Amino acid sequence: MANNGCEVHRFDPSVKSAHILESPRLWYHRLSIDWRDPHPAVAAPKLHSNTRKLGTILNEFGHHKIDVLKADLESAEWKVLENLILEDVLEQIGQLTFEVHLHWPGFEVSGRDSSVVRFWYSLLKELELKGFRLFHSYKDLSKPQLFLKKDIFNASSCYTLSWVNTRWK
């Protein structure tokens, strides 16, 4: 995408420097997108660990719009999606692609299976209400066939879902 004129920011907590400009339009940042900002008085659990809410990152970088947000948040996607909805950050995103994990509820999501599924459904429904339409779904059959820790035939514990914001300006 950077080769086609797009400004690209990649967030990877494993890079050694805080911000690296690899090419004129490609940045690497030692950051992870999270559903909460770190508490300033609490030390990060790992050296070079740095998390931020997407809204905070946008403010820090002086950005107002994201054409495409593609994220694999390693089971934090449900809480991050909830945060994007609650803080009205979705309006700033034109296209959203998330890898979702279904083998366990995810970080800070708990309760009976039915409650977890209702929570997931409520987030997906809220995306729809905010004008997002699912245009692509990929089922990764190389991942275990688990759903909330139960074996499920012909399912996957990992899907990549892509939505377009029909209200994008």
Image (tube, rainbow, N blue to C red):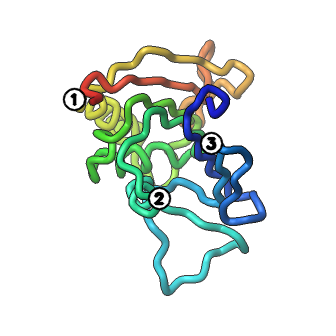
Picture coordinates of residue 6, whole percent (x, y):
55, 33
User: Callout 2, which amino acid?
Assistant: Phe
The kind of secondary structure element at disc 2 is helix
Q: Nearer the viewer, mark 1 or mark 2?
A: 2
Mark 1, residue position: 129
Q: Nearer the viewer, mark 3 or mark 2?
A: 3
Q: Is residue 106 above or below residue 5?
A: below
Mark 2, residue position: 61
Quadrant position of the C terminus in the picture: top left
Which corner quadrant of the image does residue 164 belong to? Answer: top left
In 3D space, how far apart are the residues under numbered discs 1 and 2 (Cα atoms)? 28 Å
Mark 3, residue position: 25
Circle nearer the N terminus (3, 2): 3
State the residue at coordinates (44%, 43%): 78
Q: Is residue 159 above or below residue 41?
A: above
Which corner quadrant of the image does residue 103 belong to? Answer: top right
Q: Is residue 132 above or below residue 84?
A: above
Picture coordinates of residue 59, whole percent (x, y):
39, 60
